[in-house]
């Protein structure tokens, strides 16, 4: 089929569907939802069989849905309507939710249901995490099922299976009004009649800040974490820190030991700092607040004692936004090797016996962005790991993202710091990223494995490719290029790492495409070594099994000797320092040269500026008119 993806932005779900649909042989083009006239023009140009809308913030115009099948992906069960579906589901504590694919009509989320798929709501999952993992996977299943019901020339779905074959199904009994669905929790039970009817007219309003408000004198830790989790990504929970209005993101529970050490303090008190986070007392415990965003209308022209220079209205590490106050607090660091319940951005563990030991390094950086500070921490962790006697090192990244490269928000904030600039911050950040990649490339006395539990983009992709072996699960999406960010050239030794995997010509071509790759496609192209596992958790378990088997392989000494010899041969042919110097020469032009494209693109990205047009590499229907 010819499928037009109409989406507010080319987000993780849109990219996953783009890759899956292309792999199935469909002709797919993308149009960003900029204006009704633009959508109408795109449909006229592309003449799609189906318009698929995985992520919208506006209604599709009647001039389109009245003549073309338009399927909207809604992150809610059939009958749920409104823009805050996941926010309400998390706030209510629902254990199971779902994704519905429904036909666009005049009213939002009120059209004919073509398919739906349930998904579990992980305990303590944030909204963005739930969206990227369970919701995205269920969306793929539901979309493919919905497309099977398409009949060319008809605006109506064919009769067919619209529910799930799991322990909850959806069905429309004979005589039930159009658009109304019955959810049956056990349809195979004889004589079962315990059903819940959800009518399409039920509208759940957009969740407002008064619904999210935290009462530090009454709300327990679980309630506080749930409220922040339901606002994760956007819009955050409006609150105050150090008497300054801000929005809270990225919260984690404090361990019992930490809580016991500060039991005498009043709820709401900020106690200590760790990495990017501030520890704040609740009525029955404490939480780490990792990131905050200041309120725009309360940001003075000149920084005040309660505002860090460079903070602006960007989402940044809490210890950066409130740098002055954070510096006055005690620091509460933890070692790399520690218990699971003690939160920090980095953690190291070891598995297996001596002589066949696997080291496992997690680096859970918020949204996968790696600031200069975080890069230096990871670099130092890798240097410490060198001293451990292991045969395999797994670079596990984070559960949500492996890495997305340099920290664009942090760089943007540097423009407001006296004596600093975005160009200088970019230069420091990319050099720190290069230091991390260099540590991986030169770790020749053990096998390194990059295990992608989540998506990876730009420099994060090439950090992964610095490892000997790169694994991912099928749900991972890669963006192995830089050019979308203002025509950046890129570094992280990509001109060495990628050609050694897929060759020089294929490497250059992939960089120019600027398109996302599913993990399965990346394996087929030789970029990844394997894709396996059913989701991030199952993948992690299988990674450990494979890594332990690799560490115990009888010919591991020979493999390591071969690895070391190859590195020496490569270094003699062309030193890594030369690759780095050549890449950074091009990056220097991006940062300091006459072309401001990178700085403009970064500014638009971090402030979420509305799109003015759809990039031509996505809107293939417009290429023929160039």
Image: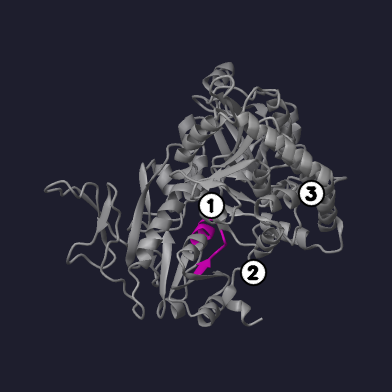
Q: Residues within 10 Å of mark 2 (few under 14, many from 20)?
A: some
Check if residue 398 falls in the magenta segment.
no
Please tell me whether mark 3 sits on a helix, a strand or a loop: helix
Q: Which residues are magenta?
A: 5-17
The disc, 1 or 3, on the residue closer to the chain's N-terminal end is 3
Please tell me whether mark 2 sits on a helix, a strand or a loop: loop
Please tell me whether mark 1 sits on a helix, a strand or a loop: helix
Q: Which residue is mark 2?
A: 615
User: Disc 2 vs disc 1: which is toward the camera?
Assistant: 1
Residue 519 tag number = 1
Residue 328 spot, x, y in % from top left: 74, 26
How far apart are labels 2 and 1 at the CA level?
23 Å
Residue 426 tag number = 3
Check if residue 11 falls in the magenta segment.
yes
Please determine whether, in this image, residue 622 is positioned above or below residue 285: below
For the residues bearing labels 2 and 3, Cβ distance under 8 angstroms: no
Residue 563 spot, x, y in % from top left: 69, 37
Residue 206 seen: yes
What residue is at 79 percent from the left and 49 percent from the top? 426
User: Disc 1 vs disc 3: which is toward the camera?
Assistant: 1
What residue is at 57 percent from the left and 17 percent from the top? 264
Please determine whether, in this image, residue 208 is positioned above or below residue 445: below
Residue 244 tag number = none
Which quadrant is home to the N terminus?
Answer: bottom left
The disc, 2 or 1, on the residue closer to the chain's N-terminal end is 1
Foreground of the two, 81 or 573: 573
């Amino acid at each position: 089929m010819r499928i037009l993806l109409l989406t507010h932005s080319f987000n993780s779900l849109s990219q996953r569907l783009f890759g899956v649909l292309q792999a199935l042989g469909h002709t797919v083009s993308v149009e960003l939802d900029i204006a009704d006239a633009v959508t109408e023009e795109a449909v006229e140009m592309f003449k799609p069989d189906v318009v698929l809308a995985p992520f919208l913030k506006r209604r599709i115009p009647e001039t389109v849905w009245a003549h073309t099948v338009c399927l909207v992906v809604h992150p809610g069960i059939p009958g749920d309507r409104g823009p805050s579906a996941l926010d309400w589901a998390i706030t209510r504590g629902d254990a199971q939710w779902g994704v519905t694919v429904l036909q666009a009509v005049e009213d939002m989320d009120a059209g004919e249901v073509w398919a739906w798929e349930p998904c579990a709501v992980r305990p303590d999952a944030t909204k963005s995490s739930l969206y990227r993992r369970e919701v995205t996977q269920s969306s793929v299943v539901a979309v493919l099922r919905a497309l099977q019901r398409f009949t060319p020339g008809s605006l109506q779905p064919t009769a067919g299976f619209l529910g799930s074959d799991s322990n909850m199904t959806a069905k429309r009994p004979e005589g039930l009004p159009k658009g109304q669905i019955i959810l049956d929790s056990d349809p195979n039970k004889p004589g079962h009649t315990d059903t819940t009817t959800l009518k399409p007219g039920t509208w759940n309003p957009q969740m407002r800040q008064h619904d999210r408000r935290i009462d530090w004198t009454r709300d327990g830790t679980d309630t506080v974490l749930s409220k922040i989790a339901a606002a994760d990504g956007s819009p955050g929970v409006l609150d105050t820190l150090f008497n300054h209005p801000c929005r809270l993101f990225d919260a984690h529970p404090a361990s019992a030991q930490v809580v016991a050490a500060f039991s005498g303090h009043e709820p709401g008190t900020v106690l200590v700092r760790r990495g990017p986070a501030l520890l704040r007392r609740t009525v029955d415990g404490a939480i780490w607040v990792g990131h905050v965003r200041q309120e725009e209308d309360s940001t003075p022209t000149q920084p005040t004692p309660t505002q860090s220079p460079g903070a602006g209205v960007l989402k940044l590490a809490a210890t950066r936004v409130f740098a002055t106050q954070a510096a006055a607090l005690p620091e509460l660091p933890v070692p790399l090797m520690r218990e699971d319940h003690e939160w920090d951005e980095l953690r190291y563990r070891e598995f297996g016996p001596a002589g066949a030991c696997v080291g496992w390094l997690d680096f859970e950086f918020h949204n996968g962005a790696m600031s200069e500070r975080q890069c230096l921490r990871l670099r130092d962790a890798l240097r410490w790991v060198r001293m451990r006697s292991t045969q395999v090192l797994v670079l596990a990244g984070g559960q949500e993202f492996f890495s997305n490269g340099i920290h664009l928000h942090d760089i943007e904030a540097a423009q407001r710091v006296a004596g600093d600039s975005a160009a200088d911050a970019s230069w420091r950040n990319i050099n720190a990223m290069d230091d991390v990649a260099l540590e991986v490339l030169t770790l020749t006395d053990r096998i390194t494995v990059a295990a992608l539990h989540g998506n990876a983009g730009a420099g994060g992709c090439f950090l992964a490719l610095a490892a000997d072996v790169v694994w991912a699960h099928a749900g991972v999406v890669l963006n192995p290029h830089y050019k979308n960010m203002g025509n950046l050239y890129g570094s992280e030794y990509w001109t060495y790492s990628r050609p050694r995997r897929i060759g020089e010509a294929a490497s250059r071509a992939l960089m120019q495409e600027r398109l996302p790759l599913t993990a399965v496609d990346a394996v087929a192209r030789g970029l990844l070594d394997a894709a396996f596992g059913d989701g991030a958790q199952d993948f992690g378990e299988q990674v450990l099994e494979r890594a332990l088997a690799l560490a115990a392989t009888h010919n591991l000494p020979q493999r390591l000797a071969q690895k070391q010899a190859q590195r020496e041969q490569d270094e003699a042919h062309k030193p890594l320092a030369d690759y780095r110097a050549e890449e950074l020469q091009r990056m220097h032009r991006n940062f300091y040269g006459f072309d401001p494209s990178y700085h403009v693109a970064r500014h638009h990205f971090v402030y979420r500026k509305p799109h003015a047009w759809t990039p031509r590499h996505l809107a293939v229907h417009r290429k023929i008119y160039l």
